[in-house]
Structures are given as structure tokens and as C-alpha cells.
Image (cartoon, rainbow, N blue to C red):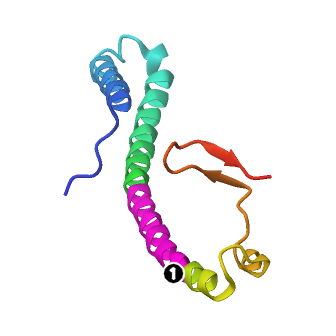
Amino acid sequence: MAGPRPSRATSAVIRRWEILLERLAEYLQDFPYLQDEYDALTQFLKDLREKDTKQEHMKGELKVLSAEIRDIKREGGKVYSAIVRHLKAEFGKDSPKLAEFIPQAQDEVDKTKGDFKKNS
């Protein structure tokens, strides 16, 4: 099974470096002073491939984790709302006692607009 594909920008860099190294390999006897740079770029290419593969794998994990967080928040929100409804019925909607159970959020994102709203 193939691993994750590199990003476009990274793929372009990898391909440029590969071409240079492939072509330069034939001329290293003629340009021995480039051997150190050739070796360094070869190692950088190896490192770049490894890091890019790891990054792409982590992006996949992040998508899964984000979906799990979204699901937990949705399901937890349903339970939270059910508890709040029961407390409102028990104490009354405007009861000071109810406020003890439901703290006012300091910084919340307005779900309809995506804007922050400050509660002071």
C-alpha cells in the first residue's frame, strides 16, 4: 500500500532535487568539488521525504481527531441541553439558582456568524 502523497509544493521541490541529483551523479568525477554539496542535498532529500510523509500522515490523523471532537461536542451538547432544560423546569428560567449551574461564557463564537461575542 502506498503512503500519503506529498503536497504539491513539496512534490515540486522533491522532483527538482531528484533531477539535479540524477544528472549531477554522472558528472561528479568531473566536478569533485561538488561532492560535499551532492551528499548534503541527497541527505536533505531523504529527510524531506520522511518529514513530508510524516506530515501527511499527521494531517490524516488530525482529520480523524477533528471529526471525533466534533461528534463528542455534538453528542455532549445534546446531553448538556437536556440537563439545562430539566434545571430550567425545576428552578425557573430566570432563577438566580439556575445561574449557579449555567455559567455565562466569557468568549463564545456566535455559531450563526462565526464572530466572537464578549459577555461582560
Q: Residues within 10 Å of mark 1 (few under 14, many from 20)?
A: few
Name the amino acid type tagged 1. Ala
Outermost residue toward the bottom in this view: 90
Residue placed at 41% from the left, 59% from the top?
Answer: 61
Instruction: Give residue 96's position: percent from left, percent from top.
Output: 79, 76
Using the image as rendered, state which of residue 78 and residue 3 is in the foreground. 78
Q: Is residue 56 left or right of residue 88?
A: left
Q: Is residue 31 left or right of residue 118?
A: left
- Vertical relation: 64 (above or below) 114: below
Disc 1: which residue: 82
Outermost residue toward the left in this view: 1
Q: Is residue 66 magenta?
A: yes
- Vertical relation: 44 (above or below) 69: above
Q: Is residue 64 magenta?
A: yes
- Vertical relation: 78 (above or below) 20: below
Instruction: Give residue 90's position: percent from left, percent from top.
Output: 64, 88
Residue placed at 51% from the left, 81% from the top?
Answer: 82
SS category of the residue bearing label 1: helix
Q: Quadrant of residue 64?
A: bottom left
Using the image as rendered, state which of residue 57 and residue 93 is in the foreground. 93
Q: Is residue 118 left or right of residue 51?
A: right
Q: Quadrant of residue 8?
A: top left
Instruction: Give residue 31's position: percent from left, percent from top.
Output: 40, 12
Residue placed at 34% from the left, 36% from the top?
Answer: 7
Residue placed at 51% from the left, 51% from the top?
Answer: 111
Instruction: Give residue 4's position: percent from left, percent from top.
Output: 29, 49
Report the quarter where the N terminus lies: bottom left
By secondary structure, the bulk of the magenta-drawn segment is best described as helix
Residue range (magenta):
61-82
